């Protein structure tokens, strides 16, 4: 097959492009592919994290005073400054998140709509994990109420916590009983 561009040389390169769901296919010789810059494998993405962080900082995700202060902040473990992070787009070590926590939270909220990672859960445990999270939240609220000496509200929360813990315990017992029945049924089938 001849090159679709020069129609002289043998086409030894097939280029398939998909743009907006439309697929095109070209058969070119090496010379024409180089001229069309189709053989340039030095891929540099147009999107980069450093550009994203820099643009977010420049557009005022952080207030100007906060951004000036955070640019000077340095990680005590690896020495990376926030200004360097905004250029590179990568934290230097696990301690960087703690060092830049105040500055990273607004960025994470913009990117992920939250600064807390919740992750995905399998459907079979989703309800149980939600109950446990709710229970932890109630315990935290109760501690705040006790600290603020709001003892009536704290007592109410204590009662709700006990009720939830009893429900969770009952569900666990029922779940274990069901597992036991299934195991008994399976062992009877094997006999």
Image (cartoon, rainbow, N blue to C red):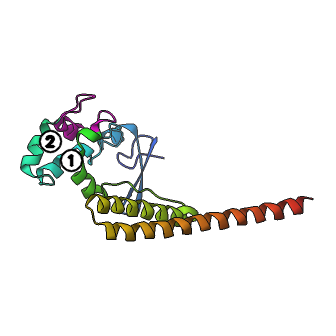
Can you give x and y, in whole percent of width and height, for residue 27 in the image? 43, 48
Helix, strand or loop for disc 2: helix
User: Where residue 102 is drawn, which disc sits there?
Assistant: 1
Marks 2 and 1 close (CB-CB < 8 Å): yes
Residue at the farthest left position: 65
| Residue 31 sits in quarter | top left
Residue at the farthest top position: 78
- Report the Cα–Cα distance between label 2 and label 1: 8 Å
Task: Using the image as rendered, state which of residue 108 and residue 191 is in the foreground.
Answer: 191
N-term mark: 2 or 1: 2
> Does residue 130 appear left or right of residue 83 in this picture?
right
Q: Mark 1 Cα within 10 Å, few/some/many (few <14, many 20+)?
A: few
Can you give x and y, in whole percent of width and height, for residue 43 in the image? 32, 40
Q: Mark 2 Cα within 10 Å, few/some/many (few <14, many 20+)?
A: many
Whether residue 5 is visible here, answered yes or no, is yes
Can you give x and y, in whole percent of width and height, for residue 169 in the image? 58, 64
The magenta span reads: 74-96
Q: Which residue is drawn at 43% across and 64% down?
A: 134
Q: Which residue is drawn at 38% across and 46% down?
A: 7
Task: Using the image as rendered, state which of residue 156 and residue 7 is in the foreground.
Answer: 156
Helix, strand or loop for disc 1: helix
Q: Does the magenta stretch include residue 83?
A: yes
Whether residue 113 is visible here, answered yes or no, is no
User: Where residue 70 is drawn, which disc sits there?
Assistant: 2
Q: Is residue 182 magenta?
A: no
Q: Which residue is drawn at 71% across and 65% down?
A: 177
With respect to residue 41, does 115 lie above or below? Answer: below
Q: Residue at x 72, y 62 (%)?
A: 179
């Amino acid at each position: 097959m001849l090159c679709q561009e020069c129609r002289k040389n043998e086409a030894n390169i097939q280029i398939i492009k998909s743009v907006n769901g439309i697929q095109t296919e070209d058969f070119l010789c090496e010379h024409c592919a180089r001229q069309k810059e189709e053989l340039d494998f030095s891929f540099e993405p147009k999107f980069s994290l450093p550009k994203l962080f820099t643009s977010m900082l420049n557009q005022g995700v952080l207030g100007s005073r906060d951004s000036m202060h955070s640019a000077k902040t340095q990680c005590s473990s690896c020495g990376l400054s926030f200004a360097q992070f905004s250029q590179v787009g990568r934290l230097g070590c696990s301690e960087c998140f703690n060092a830049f926590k105040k500055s990273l939270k607004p960025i994470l909220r913009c990117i992920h709509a939250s600064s807390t990672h919740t992750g995905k859960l399998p459907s079979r445990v989703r309800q149980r994990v939600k109950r446990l999270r709710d229970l932890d939240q109630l315990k935290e609220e109760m501690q705040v109420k006790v600290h603020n000496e709001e003892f009536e509200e704290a007592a109410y929360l204590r009662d709700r916590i006990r009720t939830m813990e009893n429900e969770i315990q009952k569900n666990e017992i029922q779940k274990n009983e069901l597992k036991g029945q299934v195991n008994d049924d399976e062992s009877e089938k094997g006999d």
